[in-house]
Image (cartoon, grey):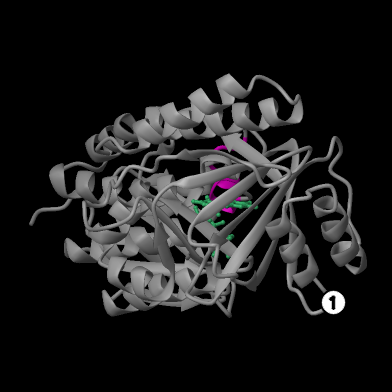
Amino acid sequence: MTLAATRILIIGGGFSGMSAAIELRKRGADVDLVEIDPGWRNYGAGISLGGATLRAFRQLGILEAFLREGNAADGVQTFLADGTPLATLPTPRVAGTDVPGGGAILRPVLARILAEATRAAGTNVQLGCTFTRIEQDADGVDVTFTDGQRRRYDLVIGADGLYSKTREALFPDAPKPRYSGQAVWRAVLPRPPEVQGAMMWMGRVKPGVNPVSKDLMYLFVTEHRPTNTHVDPATFVEQLRALLAPFPAPLVQHIRDQIGPDSQIVFRPLEGMLMPTPWSRGRVVLIGDTVHATTPHLASGACIGIEDALVLAEEIARHAQVGAALAAFEARRWERCRMVVENSGRLGEIEMANGDKEEHGRIMRESLMALAQPI
Ligand SMILES: Cc1cc2nc3c(=O)[nH]c(=O)nc-3n(C[C@H](O)[C@H](O)[C@H](O)COP(=O)(O)OP(=O)(O)OC[C@H]3O[C@@H](n4cnc5c(N)ncnc54)[C@H](O)[C@@H]3O)c2cc1C
Protein backbone atom coordinates (compact mmCIF):
# COMPACT_ATOMS: atom_id res chain seq x y z
CA MET A 1 0.00 0.00 0.00
CA THR A 2 1.39 3.44 -0.92
CA LEU A 3 0.89 5.98 1.87
CA ALA A 4 1.05 9.76 1.74
CA ALA A 5 3.23 9.49 4.87
CA THR A 6 5.15 6.50 6.22
CA ARG A 7 7.16 7.95 9.13
CA ILE A 8 4.60 9.40 11.50
CA LEU A 9 4.83 10.96 14.96
CA ILE A 10 1.78 11.17 17.24
CA ILE A 11 2.00 13.64 20.14
CA GLY A 12 -0.36 12.55 22.93
CA GLY A 13 -1.54 9.06 23.94
CA GLY A 14 -5.20 9.77 24.75
CA PHE A 15 -8.11 8.02 23.04
CA SER A 16 -7.55 9.96 19.77
CA GLY A 17 -3.77 9.50 19.59
CA MET A 18 -3.90 5.79 20.44
CA SER A 19 -6.63 5.18 17.84
CA ALA A 20 -4.55 6.96 15.19
CA ALA A 21 -1.56 4.77 16.05
CA ILE A 22 -3.58 1.56 15.73
CA GLU A 23 -5.13 2.51 12.37
CA LEU A 24 -1.88 3.83 10.84
CA ARG A 25 0.05 0.72 11.93
CA LYS A 26 -2.62 -1.44 10.24
CA ARG A 27 -1.74 0.34 6.99
CA GLY A 28 1.99 -0.20 7.43
CA ALA A 29 3.20 3.22 8.64
CA ASP A 30 6.09 3.48 11.12
CA VAL A 31 4.51 5.16 14.12
CA ASP A 32 6.18 6.84 17.10
CA LEU A 33 3.87 7.98 19.89
CA VAL A 34 5.10 10.29 22.64
CA GLU A 35 3.02 10.73 25.80
CA ILE A 36 3.98 13.30 28.40
CA ASP A 37 2.66 11.32 31.39
CA PRO A 38 5.26 8.71 32.43
CA GLY A 39 2.44 6.60 33.96
CA TRP A 40 0.14 6.92 30.88
CA ARG A 41 -2.77 7.36 33.29
CA ASN A 42 -6.34 8.29 32.47
CA TYR A 43 -8.21 10.03 35.23
CA GLY A 44 -11.93 10.17 35.80
CA ALA A 45 -14.80 7.84 36.47
CA GLY A 46 -16.85 6.32 33.68
CA ILE A 47 -17.36 7.34 30.09
CA SER A 48 -20.66 6.97 28.20
CA LEU A 49 -20.43 5.86 24.60
CA GLY A 50 -22.98 5.94 21.78
CA GLY A 51 -23.50 3.50 18.94
CA ALA A 52 -21.13 5.42 16.66
CA THR A 53 -18.33 4.96 19.21
CA LEU A 54 -19.02 1.22 19.36
CA ARG A 55 -18.89 1.14 15.54
CA ALA A 56 -15.46 2.81 15.74
CA PHE A 57 -14.39 0.23 18.39
CA ARG A 58 -15.35 -2.54 15.96
CA GLN A 59 -13.06 -1.05 13.31
CA LEU A 60 -10.24 -0.59 15.85
CA GLY A 61 -10.62 -4.23 16.89
CA ILE A 62 -11.44 -3.50 20.54
CA LEU A 63 -15.23 -4.06 20.52
CA GLU A 64 -14.95 -7.55 22.06
CA ALA A 65 -12.74 -6.26 24.88
CA PHE A 66 -15.17 -3.39 25.48
CA LEU A 67 -18.20 -5.73 25.63
CA ARG A 68 -16.31 -8.01 28.04
CA GLU A 69 -15.03 -5.31 30.40
CA GLY A 70 -17.62 -2.53 30.01
CA ASN A 71 -21.37 -2.57 29.58
CA ALA A 72 -23.57 -2.16 26.51
CA ALA A 73 -27.32 -1.39 26.54
CA ASP A 74 -30.05 0.14 24.38
CA GLY A 75 -31.82 3.44 25.05
CA VAL A 76 -31.62 6.19 27.67
CA GLN A 77 -34.45 6.24 30.21
CA THR A 78 -35.53 9.63 31.54
CA PHE A 79 -37.55 10.32 34.71
CA LEU A 80 -39.04 13.21 36.63
CA ALA A 81 -37.37 14.08 39.94
CA ASP A 82 -39.84 11.84 41.83
CA GLY A 83 -39.04 8.83 39.64
CA THR A 84 -42.07 9.02 37.32
CA PRO A 85 -40.91 7.67 33.92
CA LEU A 86 -40.84 10.33 31.21
CA ALA A 87 -39.50 8.70 28.04
CA THR A 88 -36.97 6.30 26.64
CA LEU A 89 -34.66 7.94 24.16
CA PRO A 90 -33.88 5.38 21.43
CA THR A 91 -30.20 4.78 20.67
CA PRO A 92 -29.80 3.30 17.17
CA ARG A 93 -27.75 0.06 16.87
CA VAL A 94 -25.05 1.73 14.77
CA ALA A 95 -22.33 -0.88 15.34
CA GLY A 96 -24.49 -3.72 13.97
CA THR A 97 -27.76 -5.44 14.83
CA ASP A 98 -25.88 -7.64 17.32
CA VAL A 99 -24.48 -4.71 19.38
CA PRO A 100 -26.62 -2.48 21.64
CA GLY A 101 -26.84 1.21 20.74
CA GLY A 102 -24.73 2.53 23.61
CA GLY A 103 -22.81 1.72 26.74
CA ALA A 104 -20.22 2.84 29.22
CA ILE A 105 -16.91 1.76 30.71
CA LEU A 106 -14.45 2.94 33.36
CA ARG A 107 -12.07 5.43 31.75
CA PRO A 108 -8.89 3.73 33.00
CA VAL A 109 -10.18 0.39 31.66
CA LEU A 110 -10.84 1.82 28.18
CA ALA A 111 -7.43 3.52 28.26
CA ARG A 112 -5.78 0.19 29.15
CA ILE A 113 -7.60 -1.68 26.35
CA LEU A 114 -6.51 0.96 23.82
CA ALA A 115 -2.95 1.10 25.17
CA GLU A 116 -2.61 -2.68 24.84
CA ALA A 117 -3.93 -2.51 21.26
CA THR A 118 -1.55 0.38 20.50
CA ARG A 119 1.49 -1.58 21.66
CA ALA A 120 0.27 -4.83 20.05
CA ALA A 121 -0.03 -2.98 16.72
CA GLY A 122 3.72 -2.29 16.86
CA THR A 123 3.68 1.41 17.78
CA ASN A 124 6.91 2.73 19.23
CA VAL A 125 5.56 4.26 22.47
CA GLN A 126 7.71 6.63 24.49
CA LEU A 127 6.31 7.71 27.85
CA GLY A 128 7.34 10.77 29.85
CA CYS A 129 8.44 12.46 26.64
CA THR A 130 7.27 15.32 24.46
CA PHE A 131 8.56 17.69 21.79
CA THR A 132 10.54 20.85 22.39
CA ARG A 133 10.70 22.04 18.78
CA ILE A 134 8.90 21.36 15.50
CA GLU A 135 10.47 22.64 12.27
CA GLN A 136 9.21 21.71 8.83
CA ASP A 137 10.16 22.14 5.19
CA ALA A 138 8.42 20.93 2.04
CA ASP A 139 9.65 17.33 2.44
CA GLY A 140 9.46 16.60 6.15
CA VAL A 141 9.22 17.66 9.78
CA ASP A 142 12.19 17.75 12.17
CA VAL A 143 11.17 17.22 15.76
CA THR A 144 13.38 17.70 18.80
CA PHE A 145 12.31 15.87 21.96
CA THR A 146 12.69 16.48 25.71
CA ASP A 147 15.20 13.59 25.89
CA GLY A 148 17.46 15.52 23.47
CA GLN A 149 16.77 13.28 20.47
CA ARG A 150 15.89 14.70 17.06
CA ARG A 151 14.03 12.75 14.37
CA ARG A 152 12.53 13.51 10.97
CA TYR A 153 8.96 12.56 10.00
CA ASP A 154 6.68 12.73 6.96
CA LEU A 155 3.74 13.70 9.18
CA VAL A 156 3.17 14.85 12.79
CA ILE A 157 -0.23 14.36 14.43
CA GLY A 158 -1.02 16.57 17.43
CA ALA A 159 -3.40 14.67 19.74
CA ASP A 160 -2.42 16.30 23.01
CA GLY A 161 -5.88 17.39 24.12
CA LEU A 162 -7.70 20.59 25.01
CA TYR A 163 -4.61 22.42 26.27
CA SER A 164 -2.50 21.24 23.32
CA LYS A 165 1.07 22.51 23.12
CA THR A 166 1.17 21.40 19.48
CA ARG A 167 -1.76 23.72 18.71
CA GLU A 168 -0.08 26.49 20.68
CA ALA A 169 3.11 26.06 18.64
CA LEU A 170 1.36 25.95 15.26
CA PHE A 171 -1.74 28.06 15.73
CA PRO A 172 -0.99 30.68 18.38
CA ASP A 173 -4.21 32.52 17.43
CA ALA A 174 -6.51 29.50 17.81
CA PRO A 175 -9.60 30.01 20.01
CA LYS A 176 -8.98 29.39 23.71
CA PRO A 177 -11.00 26.86 25.75
CA ARG A 178 -14.12 28.52 27.14
CA TYR A 179 -15.96 27.69 30.38
CA SER A 180 -19.54 26.66 29.55
CA GLY A 181 -21.23 27.65 32.83
CA GLN A 182 -21.77 24.02 33.83
CA ALA A 183 -19.72 21.59 35.86
CA VAL A 184 -20.09 17.85 36.24
CA TRP A 185 -19.66 15.63 39.28
CA ARG A 186 -18.86 11.97 38.75
CA ALA A 187 -18.45 8.98 41.06
CA VAL A 188 -18.13 5.21 40.63
CA LEU A 189 -20.64 3.31 42.79
CA PRO A 190 -22.05 -0.21 43.21
CA ARG A 191 -24.69 -0.96 40.58
CA PRO A 192 -28.19 -1.72 41.92
CA PRO A 193 -29.99 -4.46 39.91
CA GLU A 194 -32.56 -2.01 38.48
CA VAL A 195 -29.79 -0.05 36.71
CA GLN A 196 -29.55 -1.93 33.41
CA GLY A 197 -28.66 0.97 31.14
CA ALA A 198 -28.36 4.77 31.04
CA MET A 199 -30.91 6.59 33.26
CA MET A 200 -31.37 10.34 33.86
CA TRP A 201 -33.55 12.42 36.15
CA MET A 202 -34.81 15.91 35.33
CA GLY A 203 -34.50 18.63 37.94
CA ARG A 204 -32.59 21.78 38.77
CA VAL A 205 -29.44 19.68 38.36
CA LYS A 206 -29.30 16.63 36.03
CA PRO A 207 -28.23 13.40 37.70
CA GLY A 208 -27.73 10.26 35.64
CA VAL A 209 -26.23 6.81 35.97
CA ASN A 210 -24.74 4.38 33.48
CA PRO A 211 -23.43 0.85 34.22
CA VAL A 212 -19.69 0.51 33.53
CA SER A 213 -19.41 -3.23 34.28
CA LYS A 214 -21.50 -6.06 35.71
CA ASP A 215 -21.09 -4.73 39.27
CA LEU A 216 -20.39 -1.02 38.95
CA MET A 217 -22.04 2.07 37.53
CA TYR A 218 -20.99 5.68 37.37
CA LEU A 219 -23.02 8.59 38.59
CA PHE A 220 -22.84 11.95 36.81
CA VAL A 221 -24.51 15.12 37.98
CA THR A 222 -24.49 18.20 35.75
CA GLU A 223 -24.77 21.46 37.67
CA HIS A 224 -25.13 25.11 36.61
CA ARG A 225 -22.25 27.13 38.13
CA PRO A 226 -22.13 30.67 36.76
CA THR A 227 -18.45 31.10 37.65
CA ASN A 228 -15.60 28.65 37.38
CA THR A 229 -14.31 28.80 40.96
CA HIS A 230 -12.22 26.29 42.89
CA VAL A 231 -14.15 23.65 44.86
CA ASP A 232 -12.39 22.23 47.91
CA PRO A 233 -12.15 18.42 47.54
CA ALA A 234 -12.81 18.12 51.30
CA THR A 235 -16.39 19.26 50.56
CA PHE A 236 -17.03 16.91 47.60
CA VAL A 237 -19.08 14.29 49.51
CA GLU A 238 -21.24 16.87 51.23
CA GLN A 239 -21.82 18.89 48.03
CA LEU A 240 -22.64 15.90 45.83
CA ARG A 241 -25.08 14.53 48.43
CA ALA A 242 -26.71 17.97 48.70
CA LEU A 243 -27.25 18.12 44.92
CA LEU A 244 -29.18 14.82 45.04
CA ALA A 245 -31.26 15.72 48.12
CA PRO A 246 -34.13 17.39 46.17
CA PHE A 247 -34.82 14.20 44.13
CA PRO A 248 -37.49 12.12 45.91
CA ALA A 249 -37.07 9.20 43.43
CA PRO A 250 -36.27 6.15 45.66
CA LEU A 251 -33.44 5.04 43.34
CA VAL A 252 -31.77 8.48 43.49
CA GLN A 253 -32.03 8.45 47.29
CA HIS A 254 -30.56 4.94 47.38
CA ILE A 255 -27.66 6.15 45.21
CA ARG A 256 -27.22 9.21 47.44
CA ASP A 257 -26.93 6.92 50.48
CA GLN A 258 -24.03 5.11 48.78
CA ILE A 259 -21.94 8.30 48.60
CA GLY A 260 -19.56 8.51 51.54
CA PRO A 261 -16.01 9.42 52.55
CA ASP A 262 -14.58 6.45 50.61
CA SER A 263 -16.28 7.43 47.32
CA GLN A 264 -13.92 8.60 44.63
CA ILE A 265 -15.55 11.77 43.37
CA VAL A 266 -14.34 13.74 40.37
CA PHE A 267 -15.47 17.35 39.88
CA ARG A 268 -14.87 18.98 36.50
CA PRO A 269 -15.92 22.40 35.14
CA LEU A 270 -17.05 21.89 31.53
CA GLU A 271 -15.09 23.67 28.83
CA GLY A 272 -15.45 23.67 25.09
CA MET A 273 -13.47 24.79 22.05
CA LEU A 274 -14.08 24.52 18.32
CA MET A 275 -11.21 25.54 16.08
CA PRO A 276 -12.20 26.52 12.53
CA THR A 277 -10.41 24.64 9.75
CA PRO A 278 -7.65 24.38 8.62
CA TRP A 279 -6.61 21.92 11.33
CA SER A 280 -3.24 21.43 9.68
CA ARG A 281 -0.25 23.48 8.75
CA GLY A 282 2.04 21.85 6.21
CA ARG A 283 2.82 18.38 7.52
CA VAL A 284 1.41 18.81 11.03
CA VAL A 285 -2.27 18.03 11.69
CA LEU A 286 -4.37 18.29 14.86
CA ILE A 287 -7.07 15.77 15.90
CA GLY A 288 -9.46 15.13 18.80
CA ASP A 289 -9.87 17.59 21.67
CA THR A 290 -7.02 19.75 20.29
CA VAL A 291 -9.50 21.11 17.71
CA HIS A 292 -13.00 20.15 18.91
CA ALA A 293 -13.40 19.76 22.65
CA THR A 294 -17.08 19.33 23.42
CA THR A 295 -19.13 19.39 26.59
CA PRO A 296 -20.45 15.87 27.30
CA HIS A 297 -24.17 16.44 26.60
CA LEU A 298 -24.15 14.05 23.62
CA ALA A 299 -21.54 11.72 25.17
CA SER A 300 -19.62 11.97 21.92
CA GLY A 301 -16.31 13.76 22.61
CA ALA A 302 -14.26 10.59 22.60
CA CYS A 303 -16.27 9.35 19.61
CA ILE A 304 -15.39 12.22 17.30
CA GLY A 305 -11.71 12.13 18.34
CA ILE A 306 -11.50 8.39 17.63
CA GLU A 307 -13.34 8.87 14.33
CA ASP A 308 -10.80 11.56 13.36
CA ALA A 309 -8.14 8.89 13.74
CA LEU A 310 -10.01 6.39 11.56
CA VAL A 311 -10.68 8.93 8.80
CA LEU A 312 -7.14 10.36 8.88
CA ALA A 313 -5.61 6.90 8.44
CA GLU A 314 -7.98 6.17 5.54
CA GLU A 315 -7.08 9.41 3.78
CA ILE A 316 -3.33 8.89 4.34
CA ALA A 317 -3.72 5.52 2.59
CA ARG A 318 -5.91 6.95 -0.18
CA HIS A 319 -3.64 9.81 -1.32
CA ALA A 320 -0.08 10.07 -2.52
CA GLN A 321 0.51 13.57 -1.10
CA VAL A 322 0.21 14.68 2.53
CA GLY A 323 -1.50 17.95 1.57
CA ALA A 324 -4.25 16.18 -0.37
CA ALA A 325 -4.75 13.63 2.42
CA LEU A 326 -5.09 16.33 5.10
CA ALA A 327 -7.48 18.42 2.99
CA ALA A 328 -9.69 15.35 2.43
CA PHE A 329 -9.52 14.54 6.16
CA GLU A 330 -10.68 18.02 7.20
CA ALA A 331 -13.43 18.10 4.59
CA ARG A 332 -14.85 14.81 5.90
CA ARG A 333 -14.61 15.77 9.59
CA TRP A 334 -15.59 19.43 9.93
CA GLU A 335 -19.39 19.29 9.72
CA ARG A 336 -19.77 16.29 12.03
CA CYS A 337 -17.43 17.70 14.70
CA ARG A 338 -19.03 21.16 14.47
CA MET A 339 -22.45 19.58 14.93
CA VAL A 340 -21.38 17.71 18.09
CA VAL A 341 -19.66 20.71 19.73
CA GLU A 342 -22.38 23.25 18.86
CA ASN A 343 -25.36 21.00 19.62
CA SER A 344 -23.79 19.92 22.93
CA GLY A 345 -23.23 23.60 23.77
CA ARG A 346 -26.86 24.42 22.93
CA LEU A 347 -28.15 21.56 25.11
CA GLY A 348 -26.14 23.01 28.01
CA GLU A 349 -27.57 26.48 27.40
CA ILE A 350 -31.14 25.15 27.41
CA GLU A 351 -30.46 23.29 30.66
CA MET A 352 -28.99 26.37 32.34
CA ALA A 353 -31.91 28.57 31.27
CA ASN A 354 -34.43 25.87 32.22
CA GLY A 355 -35.49 26.41 28.62
CA ASP A 356 -37.52 24.73 25.93
CA LYS A 357 -37.78 20.96 26.61
CA GLU A 358 -39.10 20.41 23.07
CA GLU A 359 -35.99 21.97 21.57
CA HIS A 360 -33.79 19.95 23.94
CA GLY A 361 -35.48 16.69 22.88
CA ARG A 362 -35.35 17.60 19.20
CA ILE A 363 -31.62 18.43 19.29
CA MET A 364 -30.91 15.17 21.13
CA ARG A 365 -32.86 13.09 18.58
CA GLU A 366 -31.43 14.88 15.52
CA SER A 367 -27.88 14.66 16.84
CA LEU A 368 -28.16 10.94 17.59
CA MET A 369 -29.55 10.34 14.09
CA ALA A 370 -26.73 12.39 12.52
CA LEU A 371 -24.12 10.48 14.54
CA ALA A 372 -25.53 7.20 13.21
CA GLN A 373 -24.64 8.23 9.63
CA PRO A 374 -21.49 6.79 8.03
CA ILE A 375 -18.32 8.80 8.70
C1 LIG B 1 -16.29 15.89 32.41
C2 LIG B 1 -16.19 15.25 31.05
C3 LIG B 1 -17.03 14.19 30.72
C4 LIG B 1 -16.94 13.61 29.47
N1 LIG B 1 -17.77 12.57 29.19
C5 LIG B 1 -17.69 12.00 27.97
C6 LIG B 1 -18.55 10.91 27.67
O1 LIG B 1 -19.36 10.46 28.50
N2 LIG B 1 -18.43 10.36 26.43
C7 LIG B 1 -17.53 10.81 25.50
O2 LIG B 1 -17.46 10.25 24.39
N3 LIG B 1 -16.71 11.84 25.77
C8 LIG B 1 -16.77 12.43 26.98
N4 LIG B 1 -15.93 13.47 27.26
C9 LIG B 1 -14.96 13.93 26.25
C10 LIG B 1 -13.75 13.01 26.14
O3 LIG B 1 -13.23 12.71 27.42
C11 LIG B 1 -12.69 13.68 25.28
O4 LIG B 1 -13.28 14.16 24.10
C12 LIG B 1 -11.58 12.70 24.92
O5 LIG B 1 -10.97 12.20 26.08
C13 LIG B 1 -10.54 13.41 24.03
O6 LIG B 1 -9.49 12.53 23.77
P1 LIG B 1 -8.13 13.08 23.16
O7 LIG B 1 -7.25 11.88 23.01
O8 LIG B 1 -8.42 13.92 21.97
O9 LIG B 1 -7.55 14.06 24.26
P2 LIG B 1 -7.08 13.73 25.78
O10 LIG B 1 -7.96 12.70 26.39
O11 LIG B 1 -6.98 15.04 26.48
O12 LIG B 1 -5.64 13.10 25.60
C14 LIG B 1 -4.51 13.87 25.37
C15 LIG B 1 -3.28 13.07 25.75
O13 LIG B 1 -2.12 13.82 25.44
C16 LIG B 1 -1.23 13.84 26.54
N5 LIG B 1 -0.49 15.10 26.45
C17 LIG B 1 -0.89 16.35 26.85
N6 LIG B 1 0.05 17.25 26.55
C18 LIG B 1 1.07 16.58 25.95
C19 LIG B 1 2.30 16.97 25.38
N7 LIG B 1 2.69 18.25 25.37
N8 LIG B 1 3.08 16.01 24.84
C20 LIG B 1 2.70 14.72 24.81
N9 LIG B 1 1.55 14.30 25.34
C21 LIG B 1 0.73 15.21 25.87
C22 LIG B 1 -2.14 13.74 27.76
O14 LIG B 1 -1.43 13.25 28.89
C23 LIG B 1 -3.20 12.76 27.25
O15 LIG B 1 -2.80 11.42 27.43
C24 LIG B 1 -16.00 14.08 28.51
C25 LIG B 1 -15.15 15.14 28.84
C26 LIG B 1 -15.26 15.73 30.09
C27 LIG B 1 -14.34 16.87 30.42
Q: Secondary structure at mark 1?
A: loop
Q: How far across and how far down the image is residue 148, in percent?
A: 53, 74
Q: How far across and how far down the image is residue 187, in percent?
A: 69, 65
**Split into 4 quadrants, where in the image is the C terminus?**
top left
Is residue 167 inside the magenta stretch? Answer: yes
Category of crowding for the residue at label 1, using alpha-carbon neighbours closer than 10 angstroms: few (below 14), some (14–19), many (at least 20): few
Residue 153 appears in view? no
Q: How far across and how far down the image is residue 197, in percent?
A: 48, 57
Q: Residue furthest left?
A: 1
Task: Give left or right: position of 214 versus 64.
Answer: right
Residue at image point 67% right, 47% down:
83
Residue on which disc 1 sits: 261
Q: How far across and how far down the image is residue 308, in percent?
A: 36, 46
Residue 52 appears in view? yes
Residue at image point 53% right, 77% down:
215
**Split into 4 quadrants, where in the image is the N terminus?**
bottom left
Corner quadrant of residue 146: bottom right
- Is residue 38 or residue 360 the one in the foreground? 360
Is residue 54 inside the magenta stretch? Answer: no
Q: Which residues are magenta?
A: 164-172
Which quadrant of the picture is home to ligand 1? bottom right
Residue 14 vertical placement versus 139 (above, below): below
Task: Give left or right: position of 203 versus 117.
Answer: right
Residue at image point 63% right, 50% down:
163
Q: Magenta segment, principal secondary structure?
A: helix
